[in-house]
Amino acid sequence: MYYLKVKDTFSSAHSIKGYQGKCQFLHGHNWQVESTIEAPHKNELGIVYDLKQLKIDLGKVIEKLDHTVLNDLPAFRDCNPTAENLAKYIFEELCLILPDQITLRSVTIIETENCSVTYTHD
């Protein structure tokens, strides 16, 4: 099995409604996102999936999040834009873009240098 990973970043703000502490207030992050795909086979060129294309695919998803207030987006109207919910959102959106023969293994959101969340759908 081959696993390929790309990383990208975006900036946005959010607040966590119902949270008791600083995160209840509007604040921002420079989020890092890692997406990992898997596939059992390479093509005739020896490539599983073009890493450049994977980076483009991830960019299409996160460009909708960049320089926004996440709470204002329709995807987070009924749930808090936590790192957990953000990882799941990016995972689900990226799945819609990737070709059928490629399996998205995980999406990791790095909120700060010491805190991250990984979402996988098994």
Image (cartoon, rainbow, N blue to C red):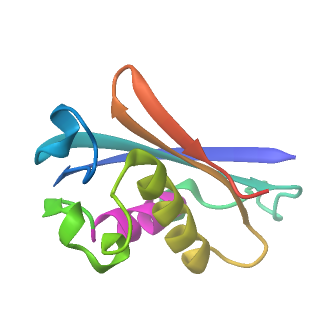
Indicate the position of residue 80 as horizontal and vertical percent values: 34, 59
Q: Is residue 94 left or right of residue 46?
A: left
Indicate the position of residue 34 as horizontal and vertical percent values: 49, 44
Task: Say which of 33 and 22 sits in front.
Answer: 22
Query: Looking at the picture, does residue 83 appear above or below residue 116?
Result: below
Task: Say which of 47 and 113 sits in front.
Answer: 113
Task: Say which of 114 and 43 sits in front.
Answer: 114
Is 34 part of what is drawn in magenta? Answer: no
Query: Looking at the picture, does residue 67 appear above or below residue 21?
Result: below
Q: Is residue 98 left or right of residue 9?
A: right
Q: How many marks?
A: 0
Q: Residue at x 79, y 73 (%)?
A: 101
Indicate the position of residue 60 as horizontal and vertical percent values: 37, 71
Q: Residue at x 15, y 63 (%)?
A: 68
Q: Residue at x 41, y 56 (%)?
A: 86
In the rendered view of the protein, which quadrant contains the C terminus?
Answer: bottom right
Residue 29: quarter of image: top left
Which residue of the protein is positioned furthest toward the top in this rendering? 114
Query: Looking at the picture, does residue 75 appear above or below residue 63?
Result: below
Task: Say which of 6 and 35 sits in front.
Answer: 35
| Magenta span | 54-64
Residue 112: quarter of image: top left
Magenta residues, dominant SS class: helix
Q: Is residue 11 left or right of residue 112?
A: left
Is 55 part of what is drawn in magenta? Answer: yes
Q: Residue at x 56, y 70 (%)?
A: 92
